[in-house]
Image: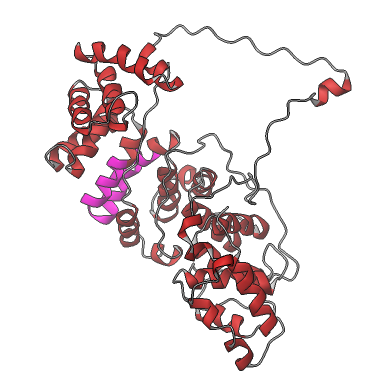
């Protein structure tokens, strides 16, 4: 029976980026604005990395690059399509709407946190769309009268059935505790981890973090990889146990070497934080690779940056930089979606693909990534991967400006719009909700 855990990667993304910037000077120019990493437990490790080729949008200049990335001056907009302008006094009529709160009936999402929780699912091509419910009707082959092929025979399970974890996975928490506790009391490390998890989350029993810490310690000392990872986190944070960084590092390393993917990512982060820039990154690389292969999106994103910026790596690794970024983006990591969009537009680590780049940036922008909202405005202005649309460009500028991202180039563009266009852009921004 497969075991399920709450695997929470410890976020040290800032330390990772700082170390990578020191190891490769160009890295600091190649990353967009700092972002907060989302809560990502894992990714689709089997997702293909290929991106369909797409021709540049009509009128798009092949030399245009997005700001904040290699080849573009900071804070400057790339040359693009021009839209009808207006006198300065016309644009100033709507200036107060940029920074002030939106009307109550049309509150901007970024100024109305109460609606932040309403999030829909995204379609694979990056466009926001609700997923339809599966049909219960006839399939295509049924309608054609063709017989359906037989399903392949299911392989018989020959391993040991774990009744406790099976009950936990089905949501029968009392049964899981009844089955796991006697085994935990007899010293079985895997059962001790499960008991700790049930106490930590209050599943079937009253939440008791002290009891959880006790059982995680027993499981860690008994050699269970998941238990070692959970106990290492407690030792690092000083929750319910005395803080002990040395012991935390020891258990995290043991859990990583035993194959726990979240421990592998976290131990890599520790190596980056503790070592010299280039040396720490190279020591962490094997652990990032193992974690990425097991589907941790944070590790997949880290690999895309390391494979692009570390020198002396073999081609079989550097050639996969964009593949790992695609995997992290498909797992829902919005920073990866942002970087992938910029890579595709600018031709980083592969061919340019304006349409695919627009879709990934739009997906991140729809999810609330402020830097992506800024970049999408440029794509609408320059007609890269999409048709030129001054209202949409203005809308995304207003949203990113309200979130605190100032851009002189976009502000000049916005002030050049007509009064009606500015009002339409503000109205569209007020109606925006995370998708």
| Residue 431 appears in the figure | yes
Q: Is residue 258 left or right of residue 91?
A: left
Question: Does the magenta run of residues contain 288?
Answer: yes
**Residue most toward the right?**
144
**Magenta residue check for 75:** no
Is residue 202 or residue 124 the one in the foreground? 202
Q: Residue at x 60, y 73 (%)?
A: 426
The magenta-colored residue range is 266-289
Q: Nearer the viewer, residue 36 or 61?
A: 36
Q: Nearer the viewer, residue 378 or 237?
A: 237
| Relative image position of residue 362 (x, y in whole percent) | 60, 58
The image's colouring method is secondary structure
Looking at the magenta stretch, what is its main secondary structure?
helix
Residue 408 located left or right of residue 236: right
Q: Is residue 65 visible?
A: no
Residue at left offset 61%, top offset 44% = 50
Question: Would you place residue 149 above or below residue 62 in this image?
Answer: above
Horizontal and vertical percent for residue 92?
57, 88
């Amino acid at each position: 029976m497969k075991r399920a855990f709450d695997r929470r990667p410890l976020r040290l993304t800032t330390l990772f980026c700082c170390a990578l910037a020191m190891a490769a000077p160009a890295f600091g120019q190649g990353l967009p604005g700092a972002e907060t990493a989302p809560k990502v437990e894992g990714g689709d490790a089997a997702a293909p990395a290929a991106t369909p080729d797409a021709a540049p949008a009509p009128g798009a200049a092949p030399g245009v690059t997005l700001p904040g990335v290699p080849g573009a001056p900071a804070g400057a907009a790339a040359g693009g399509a021009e839209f009808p302008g207006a006198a300065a006094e016309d644009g100033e009529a709507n200036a107060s709407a940029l920074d002030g709160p939106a009307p109550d009936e049309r509150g901007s999402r970024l100024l109305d946190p109460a609606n932040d929780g309403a999030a829909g699912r995204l379609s694979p091509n990056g466009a926001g769309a609700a997923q339809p419910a599966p049909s219960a009707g006839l399939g295509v082959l049924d309608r054609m009268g063709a017989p359906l092929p037989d399903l392949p025979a299911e392989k018989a399970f020959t391993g040991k059935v774990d009744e406790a974890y099976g009950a936990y996975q089905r949501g029968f928490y009392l049964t899981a505790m009844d089955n796991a506790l006697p085994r935990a009391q007899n010293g079985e490390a895997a059962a001790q981890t499960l008991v700790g998890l049930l106490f930590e989350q209050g599943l079937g029993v009253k939440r008791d973090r002290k009891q959880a810490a006790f059982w995680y310690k027993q499981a860690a000392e008994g050699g269970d990889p998941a238990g070692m990872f959970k106990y290492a986190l407690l030792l690092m944070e000083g929750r319910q146990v005395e803080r002990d960084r040395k012991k935390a590092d020891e258990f995290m390393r043991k859990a990583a070497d035993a194959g726990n993917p979240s421990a592998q990512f976290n131990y890599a982060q520790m190596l980056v934080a503790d070592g010299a820039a280039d040396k720490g990154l190279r020591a962490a690389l094997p652990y990032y690779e193992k974690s990425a292969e097991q589907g941790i999106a944070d590790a997949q994103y880290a690999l895309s940056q390391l494979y692009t910026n570390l020198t002396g790596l073999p081609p079989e690794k550097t050639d996969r930089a964009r593949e790992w970024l695609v995997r992290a983006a498909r797992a829902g990591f919005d920073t990866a979606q942002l970087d992938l969009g910029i890579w595709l537009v600018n031709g980083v680590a592969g061919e340019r693909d304006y349409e695919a780049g627009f879709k990934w940036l739009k997906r991140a922008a729809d999810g609330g990534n402020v830097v992506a909202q800024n970049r999408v405005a440029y794509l609408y202005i320059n007609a890269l991967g999409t048709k030129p649309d001054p209202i949409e460009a203005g809308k995304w500028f207003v949203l990113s400006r309200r979130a605190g991202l100032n851009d002189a180039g976009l502000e000049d563009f916005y002030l050049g719009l007509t009064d009606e266009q500015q009002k339409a852009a503000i109205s569209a921004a007020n109606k925006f909700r995370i998708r």
